[in-house]
Image (cartoon, rainbow, N blue to C red):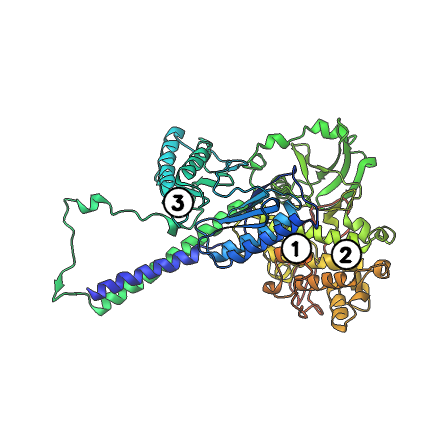
Amino acid sequence: MYQNNNLFAFFRVIILILITMIYKTTSMPTRLGQYCSNTTMFANGSTYQTNLNTVFRNLVSNATNNPSGFYRTTVGNPTIEVVYGQYLCRGDQNMASCHQCVVTATTVDLPKTYCPNGKTAVIWYDECMVRYSNVSFFNTMDQSPAMSYKNGNNITGNSTQFMEILGNMMNNVIAVRAPEGGPLKKFAVDKAYYSIFETIYGLGQCTPDLSRSDCDQCLVSCFDRFDDQSRGFQIMTPSCLVRYELYPFFNLSFLPQSPPSPSIASSSNPVIMPSRSKGKLKVSTKVLVSIIAALLVFSVALFSICIYLLRKKAKKVEVVTNVEIVDQDFSAESLQYDLQTILTATNNFSDENKLGEGGFGRVYKGTLSDGQLIAVKRLSRSTSRDIQAFKTEVLVVAKLQHRNLARLLGFCYTDQAKLLVYEYFANKSLENFLFDHENRRQLDWQRRYNIIVGIARGLLYLHHESQFRIIHRDLKASNILLDEEMNPKISDFGTSRIFGADHSQSNYTNTVVGTHGYMAPEYAFHGRFTIKSDVYSFGVLVLEIICGRKNSSFSQASDANDILTNAWKHWEAGTPLEFVDPTIRDSCSNASEVMRCIQIALLCVQQAVGDRPTMANVVLTLDSHSITLPLPEQSSFTARPRVQRTVSNEIGSYHSSNKPIPVSVNDVSISEPEAR
């Protein structure tokens, strides 16, 4: 019996290890949405702002070590400028994840990005909810404002049967909650089998300060809003949230323990037990070793299958196979333009309306019938890779909404033409200003700094805050558009790769696309790319913005091989300001800010991927000068060998002149890159 128990214990440990390896959490929270009142605002430097900052500090401090995942605090005089604040972390989150979510909400998103001066705000993440107001909301059920997200795919089969099974499961979720006045979390999850292949997973949670009846009412009200056709739905209010999906989206260890099946206990068939002798199991050592070896082989095989399925799923998310399924959350037809409309707007793509030309094709200025100005990118070729780039750009940009990303107005996809329609920017690209001797004088340091911050926030959104995790792979000055107020807009997503929001592993490609000089070494040499590849490109771009010179211009200079070597030499010599563009060097009044940006850029281009910061850390550092930065280390900038892979030209921009050069090292043959 003892050996038998050990055997089962061993098997249980193997299974737990596999579950632990497969289940993972993201380091950065996934923002779902926010509400900020624009009717009651506070002034910068006011007492309300001071009290609000104290509330934020209290929330962060408490979230450091609070297993309950819930906390509320009040700061200020009850009659003058009082601030009420609270956070609620999802019941299956650990303390580290909870703390990171509260930190992101209170240090960046609420005070700086989304609700900088609102007296009332609430922000929802996958991991937590943070709320504050000048009016007390404690112990009160609030169902407004409410936000909802649904899976764009509809269920297959009988919708009535689906809703019946879903309703029974959600009733179980609603029924499992803390007793009246109890200290436990008002959080529950459950699952139900819809078919032999599909399982419904459900979650419900209330703020613990609600009474039992209020919690019931809040959850039921949310459930009543579910769409009876959707494969997944989520409703979030300030007091509760309800969600279901046809995939496990929470920590499965929180599922309620199922009771033993009565069919097994009452079976008429006898249970065959192993023969016993003197209380010991008759199993030889050889047999026992064979069983353990078989279990190990089975465990390894199971783990390999899981990894294969996860990668296959990520690959499916990454590839767009049909332009008709541009987005699961809206109809593609809503973005489609009629070809005749574009022909009229661009005067049949006349040369007078031509703005520029890149690897994607030509870009034209157009005017719609209502007077709106547009920029139209026309695909010049129809190779399979160009078509894929077109579909990728539509898929990516159509889903993105951020002030530092170029907005896609629509597209036209016919046998005669494949067109992307963007908002028009009179200032064209950052390249148009930064690398022009006269135009770059318009970019004083303050404008350059604002451009750096804007690009960083746009990348932060792509990497951590959008519905998908997006790696741009071709970040450079010509792909940064400037609006009338010189605000930066990241554009050209044809080379981007799309992944699930929780995707964080390295990815590999046999075809390296991008622009030489901006690509991270691990991507250029080995085809390995992550979000840190974009961080590297951002570092190169920041150095270009600071010095006013294109990276490629240093290859013809006698003092340095490239911009990274030049920047490092000045940093190491203690003369970083000599690296600054001479046109702004004397007029720049904030030398410490310039030096800090150089330091951030050098950290972004570190040779080791793990030594580079995330864009979340970059944005936080740019927003707060009180954060101490680590010192960059010298990377192997000098004598760097050329790229030994096929490098595809950029997808295109308003103006682009970079051309890839196929090279060979140590007699390794390089194929001619296919133009885009």
Say which of 326 and 405 sits in front.
405
Instruction: Kindly check if marks 1 and 2 are in contact, taking CB atoms under 8 A apart as contact.
Output: no
Sooner in the amino-acid sequence: mark 3 or mark 2: 3
Along the viewing direction, whichever of 188 and 460 lies nearer the viewer = 188
**Closer to the eye: label 1 or 2:** 1
Spot occupied by residue 349 in the image (x, y as percentages of width and height): 77, 33
Q: Which residue is mark 2?
A: 545
Residue 181 visible, this orientation = yes
Q: Give the residue number, with chain letter if any, for mark 1.
A: 619
Residue type at the position of mark 3: Val
- Indicate which disc, 1 or 2, sits on the residue closer to the N terminus: 2
Q: Nearer the viewer, mark 3 or mark 2?
A: 3
Instruction: Name the amino acid type tagged 1.
Output: Val
Q: Quadrant of residue 593?
A: bottom right
Q: In this view, which residue lies farthest toward the right? A: 438
Disc sitting over residue 189 in the figure: 3
Q: State how far apart marks 1 and 2 are (Cα).
A: 17 Å
Image point (41%, 58%), residue name: 20
Measured as percent of width and height from the top left, residue 76 is found at: 60, 50
In the image, what residue type sits under mark 2? Ile
Secondary structure beneath label 2: helix
Element carrying mark 1: helix
